[in-house]
Image (cartoon, rainbow, N blue to C red):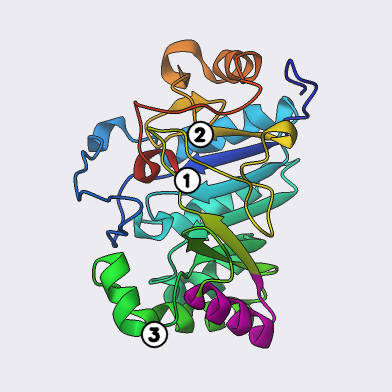
């Protein structure tokens, strides 16, 4: 599928929940959030159908996000359901890593190929403060479990203020070098003001080469994270919602006032 700017769209990011077990300052800076009603969240069967239709339209890369995807019950089953869809070449998941030690092996066996794990600092006290009480040791054990499970590549998402030369970022970079991990540095973003940049060591934020659509946990197909444009798959149907989103995909991101990182999937 090509959009109006001749970009090939082959990547769908699916938010499976707006719930999370952490309260990271840059995701919920004021601690205010409004969870979707349980009945509004897409069922796994609906998500699998979205993937089937997506593949028929040219999508071959799927990423599961949240909130925190590992807090959703039976998430391993969803990975199995997606892996069973012919034409899906790549299945990835983004996680904060807290529950990864428990799930890494199961996810790999279900068909997950690779994983991104959030890690902004190696200082336990600072980690707990930034994440609203998170346990750094659990994340480090989760990373080891992902390595043992054969998930590859393992990418570490490190949020920075302005530069990857910041002390915490340098420590994370060295940790990644020593452990065979890929470090990605993401400058703090703001949906409301449209503040974003290209990910250091990744492709996010590179509007001219953007190849993705996003599906929110309650079924809204979004052409861009930094846009209020969205199409409800339950209203339009999956195929039409996707086609509308592709046709409406902006040349570059601006801002978004009708969503937050925790319920879109950053």
Farthest-out residue, bottom:
178
Residue 66: x percent and y percent?
A: 41, 49
Spatial distance from mark 1 to mark 3, Cα to Cα?
Answer: 24 Å
Other-residue count near label 2 (Cα within 10 Å), few / some / many at <14 / 14–19 / ≥20 = many
Q: Secondary structure at mark 2?
A: loop
Quarter of the image holding residue 86? top right
Q: Which residue shows up at 37% across the image and 32% down it? A: 192
Residue 216: x percent and y percent?
A: 43, 34
Tell me the quarter of the image containing the N terminus. Answer: top right
Residue placed under numbered mark 3 in the picture: 137
Q: Secondary structure at mark 3?
A: helix
Residue placed under numbered mark 1 in the picture: 266
Q: Which residue shows up at 40% across the image and 33% down it? A: 193
Residue 145: x percent and y percent?
A: 54, 81
> In the image, is 180 to the left or to the right of 71?
right
> In the image, is 230 to the left or to the right of 185?
left
Residue 87 visible to the viewer: yes
Q: Secondary structure at mark 1?
A: loop
Answer whether labels 1 and 2 touch (C-beta < 8 Å).
yes
Q: Main secondary structure of the magenta part?
A: helix
Tag 2 or tag 1, which sits nearer the N-term?
A: 2
State the extent of the magenta-drawn residues as a range.
167-182
Residue 55: within the magenta? no
Residue placed under numbered mark 2 in the picture: 225
């Amino acid at each position: 599928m090509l959009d109006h700017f001749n970009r090939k769209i082959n990547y769908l990011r699916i938010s499976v929940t707006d719930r999370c077990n952490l309260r990271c300052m840059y995701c919920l800076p004021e601690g205010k959030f409004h969870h979707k009603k349980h009945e509004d969240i897409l069922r796994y069967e609906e998500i699998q159908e979205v993937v089937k239709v997506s593949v028929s339209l040219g999508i071959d890369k799927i990423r599961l996000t949240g909130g925190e995807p590992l807090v959703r019950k039976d998430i391993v089953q969803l990975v199995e359901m997606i892996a069973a869809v012919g034409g899906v070449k790549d299945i990835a998941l983004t996680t904060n890593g807290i529950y990864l030690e428990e799930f890494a092996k199961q996810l790999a066996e279900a068909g997950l190929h690779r994983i991104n794990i959030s890690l902004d600092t190696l200082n336990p006290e600072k980690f707990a403060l930034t994440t609203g009480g998170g346990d750094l040791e659990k994340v480090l054990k989760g990373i080891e479990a992902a390595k043992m499970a054969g998930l590859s590549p393992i990418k570490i998402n490190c949020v920075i203020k302005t530069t990857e030369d910041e002390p915490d970022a340098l420590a994370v970079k060295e940790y990644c070098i020593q452990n065979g991990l890929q470090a990605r540095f993401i400058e703090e973003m703001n949906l409301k003001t449209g503040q974003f940049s290209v990910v250091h060591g990744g492709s996010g934020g590179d509007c001219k080469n953007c190849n993705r659509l996003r599906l929110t946990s309650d079924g809204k197909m979004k052409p861009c994270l930094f846009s209020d444009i969205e199409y409800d798959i339950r209203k339009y149907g999956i195929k039409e919602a996707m086609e509308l989103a592709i046709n409406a995909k902006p040349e570059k991101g601006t801002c978004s006032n009708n969503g937050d990182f925790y319920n879109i999937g950053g």
